[in-house]
């Protein structure tokens, strides 16, 4: 019995050892197969043109093929961080934290991510890579243990795209930025001012007398003048600055960490370059000067349009004004019988300049004059006073010559700052008229054209009878014509809606007598129109 038991035990042990031997053989075969599979996978990776990385959650990155090592200029199989001097950049070329790359985002979110990144090596060369990262999550686990990433070198494509973008954003004549790119740069700078407390200066430049250059020497010489101005700006720019040709003969510059005085010095240096150009190319037959507007950008600065409007306003105020008073005095001294006519001609020339900038103003002023004439006659004014009312109505928008184009043509409501600039135009218009002999008496009426009967108008808050009668008449006529005209920011009101508004605001905005006279004149005009239509139908 004992011998039988020993025999069975020996047989069982031999079977166990046989099973162990078989298991070991199978394990060796599996290891060999795994090594062969790894070799095949490695060979497959080496045939790829794309660089392949395995980025682990602990920060280790395995470089799985030769292109990966070539991109990072290393022979190491595993990296724990980028070597000193290497830098990752975002699509705009700004430094980027590694946690924001597709690899870092894929580890953090567990989702596939892709992006185009810049990789700058220690010697300064830049390579652009299209990176696609996909997380590796084991069954039953929520967080990825690693991320498989592939990178394709898209440097040539990226540089072509950047070149095309750069070309599309530049003024073809001067090589400076165009308006759209400049406004983008200005928006970024304003954001930095608000966020980091940086300071910069916005410089607006207008080339005076440029039209005379084109008329006297031709467009090609005019182009040379613009290029000389652009070159003068480019020579004084640093890498952090930005300059653009906004359109025509207007330019704008953002200067970093420069105060108002330094900005004006820069403008003077550019003006000196223009003077030199005029002496060399134009034989000094025409002087080339600049009108300059300067706005300091800081944490309290507004938006892009507000900053530009403020710079344009100061630039307009800096423009040389003709000495109209001296011109009128010379006419009188010379015994010229047409001194008043000469003064009016000067004003008409200025009105033409305003109307060229804002086509609405041309038709608007003529219609306001016709309405004002009818109202003045219904109020019983004599011919002399009627002519004064007509003149005030004609010139009520003269001061808009100092209002920036960006405000005159803006589609949409004006900001508070833009409203302040617009409300200066009656003051400017009155100052211009007051400097001209025989017309200075129109200054008070032009200045008060936006005063309201209840005292809530501008610029002086006059009320009631303190407002000149010509201003009261021009104001209500101006309001009716404006309400019934299409504007960039709204559609015209109907005649009946405008009438209702004037009736409602009589005694508040409008002088009751002037409002009543206007309503009578409009009703009479419409009745006359209907009568003519009926007569035509009967005929």
Image: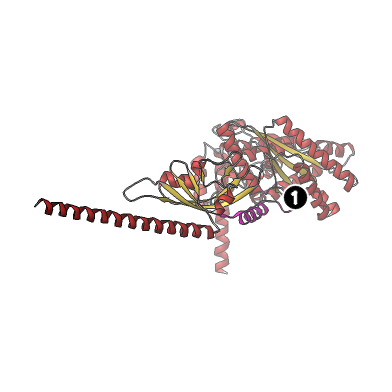
Residue 175 included in the magenta stretch of the image: yes
Q: Quadrant of residue 396?
A: top right
Residue 155 included in the magenta stretch of the image: yes
394 or 313: nearer the eye?
313
In this image, 478 relative to 229: left or right? left
Q: Can residue 365 be seen in this snapshot? A: no
In this image, 20 relative to 247: left or right? left
The residue wearing badge 1 is 174
The residue located at (32%, 54%) in the rendering is 24
89 or 21: nearer the eye?
21
286 or 501: nearer the eye?
286
494 or 275: nearer the eye?
275
In this image, 521 relative to 56: left or right? right
Q: Position of residue 105 (x, y in %)?
A: 46, 45
Q: Which residue lies furthest to the bottom in this view?
A: 539
Q: Residue furthest front?
A: 3
In this image, 33 relative to 116: left or right? left
Q: Where is residue 71 in the image (x, y as percent from the top left)?
A: 58, 50
Report the magenta residues as a range: 152-178
Q: Residue furthest left?
A: 1
Q: How many marks?
A: 1
- Local packing at callout 1 (Cα closer than 10 Å; few below 14, some 14-19, many 20+) is many
């Amino acid at each position: 019995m004992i011998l039988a038991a020993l025999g069975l035990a020996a047989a069982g042990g031999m079977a166990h050892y046989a099973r162990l031997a078989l298991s070991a053989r199978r394990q060796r075969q599996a290891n060999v197969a795994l090594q062969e599979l790894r070799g095949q996978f490695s060979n497959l990776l080496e045939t790829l043109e794309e660089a392949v990385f395995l980025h682990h959650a602990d920060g280790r990155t395995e470089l799985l093929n030769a292109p990966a090592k070539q991109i990072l200029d290393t022979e190491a199989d595993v990296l724990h961080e980028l070597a000193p001097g290497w830098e990752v950049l975002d699509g705009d070329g700004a430094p980027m934290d590694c946690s924001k790359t597709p690899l870092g985002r894929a580890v953090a979110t567990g989702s596939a991510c892709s992006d185009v990144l810049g990789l700058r090596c220690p010697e300064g060369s830049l390579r652009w890579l299209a990176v696609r990262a996909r997380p590796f999550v084991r069954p039953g686990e929520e967080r990825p243990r690693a991320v498989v990433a592939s990178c394709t070198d898209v440097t040539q494509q990226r540089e072509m795209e950047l070149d095309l973008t750069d070309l599309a954003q530049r003024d073809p004549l001067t090589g400076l930025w165009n308006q759209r790119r400049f406004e983008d740069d200005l928006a970024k700078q304003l954001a930095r001012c608000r966020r980091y407390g940086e300071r910069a200066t916005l410089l607006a430049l207008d080339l005076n007398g440029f039209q005379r250059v084109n008329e006297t020497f031709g467009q090609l010489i005019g182009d040379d003048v613009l290029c000389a101005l652009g070159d003068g700006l480019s020579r004084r720019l640093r890498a952090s600055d930005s300059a653009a040709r906004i359109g025509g003969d207007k330019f704008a510059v953002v200067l970093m960490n420069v105060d108002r005085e330094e900005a004006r010095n820069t403008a003077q240096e550019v003006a000196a370059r223009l003077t030199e150009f005029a002496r060399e190319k134009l034989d000094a037959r025409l002087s080339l000067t600049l009108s300059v507007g300067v706005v300091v950008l800081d944490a309290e600065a507004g938006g892009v349009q507000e900053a530009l409007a403020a710079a344009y306003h100061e630039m307009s105020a800096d423009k040389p004004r003709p000495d109209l008073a001296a011109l009128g005095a010379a006419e009188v001294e010379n015994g010229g019988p047409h001194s008043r006519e000469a003064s009016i001609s000067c004003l008409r020339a200025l009105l033409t300049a305003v109307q060229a900038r804002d086509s609405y103003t041309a038709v608007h002023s003529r219609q306001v004059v016709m309405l004002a004439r009818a109202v003045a006659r219904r109020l019983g004014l004599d011919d002399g006073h009627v002519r004064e009312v007509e003149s005030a109505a004609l010139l009520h928008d003269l001061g808009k010559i100092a209002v920036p184009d960006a405000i005159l043509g803006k589609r949409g409501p004006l900001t508070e700052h833009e409203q302040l600039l617009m409300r200066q135009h009656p003051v400017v218009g009155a100052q211009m008229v007051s400097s001209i002999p025989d017309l200075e008496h129109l200054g008070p009426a032009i200045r008060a054209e936006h005063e309201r009967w209840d005292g809530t108008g501008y610029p002086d808050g006059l009320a009631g009878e303190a407002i000149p009668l010509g201003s009261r008449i021009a104001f209500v006529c101006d309001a009716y014509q404006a309400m019934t005209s299409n504007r960039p920011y709204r559609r015209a009101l109907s005649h009946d809606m405008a009438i209702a508004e004037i009736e409602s605001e009589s005694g508040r905005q409008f002088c009751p007598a002037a409002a009543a006279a206007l309503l009578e004149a409009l009703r009479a005009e419409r009745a006359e129109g209907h009568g003519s239509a009926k007569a035509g139908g009967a005929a």
